[in-house]
Amino acid sequence: MKKRRINEIKKILEKNDIEALLLITTDFIRDRNVDYILGTFLENVSASIIISLDEIKLLAPKWFEIKIDNSVKIIEIKNFFDVNTIKKEIKKFKKIGINKNYFPYTIGSKLRKFKLIDVSEELLNIRAIKDEEEIRNIKRACSISNKIIKKIEKEIRKNLSEFYIEKIIEEEIAKINHATLAFNTIIASDRRSGSIHPIPSYSNKKIKNYGIIDFGIRYKGYCSDVTIPFLIGDVPNKLKKILRVIKNIHDSSIEQIKPFLEVKYLFESANENVKNTFGFEMQHALGHGIGLDIHEYPTISPKSKNIFKDNMIFTIEPGIYIKNAGFRIENDLLIKNKKPKLLTKANIIEK
Amino acid sequence: MKKRRINEIKKILEKNDIEALLLITTDFIRDRNVDYILGTFLENVSASIIISLDEIKLLAPKWFEIKIDNSVKIIEIKNFFDVNTIKKEIKKFKKIGINKNYFPYTIGSKLRKFKLIDVSEELLNIRAIKDEEEIRNIKRACSISNKIIKKIEKEIRKNLSEFYIEKIIEEEIAKINHATLAFNTIIASDRRSGSIHPIPSYSNKKIKNYGIIDFGIRYKGYCSDVTIPFLIGDVPNKLKKILRVIKNIHDSSIEQIKPFLEVKYLFESANENVKNTFGFEMQHALGHGIGLDIHEYPTISPKSKNIFKDNMIFTIEPGIYIKNAGFRIENDLLIKNKKPKLLTKANIIEK
């Protein structure tokens, strides 16, 4: 059990005058807060966890196998949606904290007699600050990514297809224990790069022109996330200019990062730059936290209420998309000892 | 757009006197019914879909890139939980069908003025019968699995670690376009095999004794799922006996499969066999449908209401677990022309 994490959650209970927090994770609704609290990356496992000031209960099927210290009381549950057992275990409470977006309606609709209070924001805020173990795992995910970046940079100078690039990444994962893809790799060359999140539909044709490679590695549950833009052969000067602007925003954003800076300020500064140069605004956030989820706090967007702090890990990923073309450069950073530290080495590939 | 699938859904609307079906899929709540209806495997994409008798609306972020024919009206949504846009699009209806277990509480709790009707069972029933495209993809996932099984069978005769076996599977995936893991591989040797779903926590130590390898391949969205039990070196006769019984149940279950047979009967027949031999009952279902999800209908359990039909694809996976040891053998089958057809070739490995 992760004591610091539990203590942070108890503070949420006290602050919100909530008696217990109820979190549910299943095969198809993955609430990584459960993994976070247990300190284990759960895969193919469903469980509910109830944290009150007095005790922690884990409701799980009887074949649940994780070794947990005896600060946690394990209660057998028949299936993920065994509401009766859940109800029984929370019956002495009135106000229950939940992670609303990840909470199944099946269960929520049967807990009408309880007051359900959404504490998802607070949970996101706790997880935005990484502890040593988390930093170690993300650093490892990043170093695996760096190895792959180097390989892609080297091999893209041959004539490669989108599929072949995907396979380079998977081959590297196949060599390293505890490593998997964090998400399905996005490779979009030529016109398809104009979409922000193109659906993977790769081609065996040789890549020419331009595009992006966006991939993530999960190491012991923790994610990295990088995007490499590339230019191959003769591409219009207009696209080269876009890429120069992106690189410039990427670098100057990183230079500005420091503790106590408002996160939204960093977005606004980059957005101003895009607006002045192109006459339109940024089409997505400038970056996002990474951890057990691929999108965590801080979200570097105009609505963010976060401020940068030591031990935050997040991406910086300015992107510009026009009709039939788009580029993005994305790297992962850690703020440590009040300074931003680049963990990944994504850069423009020009050939 | 998949016309047959849409027609089946319209029948659900009419049968349940529902005016529209509302399905939501996000990064962390994956409702594969959306993929099923669109006929595309969505990854890293959030979308809502509203199907009424008159029209189909897809609510998606503006960078949604899938090519959809013009039978679908696309409506821009700001984020997954943009309830106002959802409300606006369903405002003319009173009774709305939902997939309850996959429906986020955030949205459900804001739709109180609508009557939400759970049609998850009906959706599962539609998807239990595969169409030609689905069968083609699952068959391909199975043939990739067979290649891997052969390789494991050959290589396990060397001295392998759990990690090395995991890597054999990942190496094969890295060679094949459109192929990924369907779930994190489960490899449990020695005492850990006593758990049904052991958490992946592999070892670099050479495997001796006994255990299982349970893995799945996803090809163009569609899953295979196999388990290979193994015995290496000198193992107690008791365990060999367990494995013989499992193989016997596996084979005789397959022999009994035919259209119009009640699914629960197949479970009961296997369970009877386990009870007579060991004095305890089966600890999990005898099998489950596979498709876009790794667990679909029919669930071969005592509670199943399904009957076997042509074009169903499912696993048969009898398992027996005692303290500190467990075995399971799992293969995938298709019922075609009234006969069960084995799609995979998992078998006991004895060395």
Image (cartoon, coloured by chain):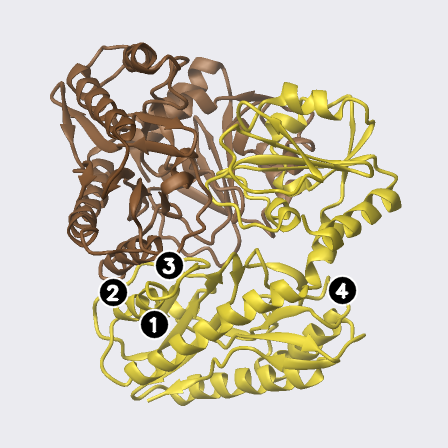
Chain colours: A yellow, B brown
Q: Residues within 10 Å of mark 2 (few under 14, many from 20)?
A: some
Task: Give left or right: position of B37 versus A38.
Answer: left
Q: CA distance from mark 2 to mark 4?
A: 40 Å
Q: Nearer the viewer, mark 1 or mark 4?
A: 4
Q: Nearer the viewer, residue B126 or A21?
A: A21
Q: Is residue B337 above or below residue B330?
A: above
User: Dot 1: what SS?
Assistant: strand
Q: Name the kind of residue labelled 3 in the image.
A: Asn
Q: Is residue B45 above or below residue A155?
A: above
User: Dot 2: what SS?
Assistant: loop
Mark 4 highlights which residue? A306
Q: Residue at (40%, 64%) from the top-left corner?
A: A186
Subunit of label 1: A
Q: Name the kind of residue labelled 1 in the image.
A: Ser
Q: CA distance from mark 2 to mark 1?
A: 9 Å
Give whichever of discs 1 and 4 has the lower sequence position.
1
Instruction: Answer whether labels 2 and 4 touch (C-beta < 8 Å).
Output: no
Q: Is residue B148 above or below residue B33?
A: below
Mark 1 highlights which residue? A189
Q: In which quadrant will I find the N terminus of chain B?
A: top left
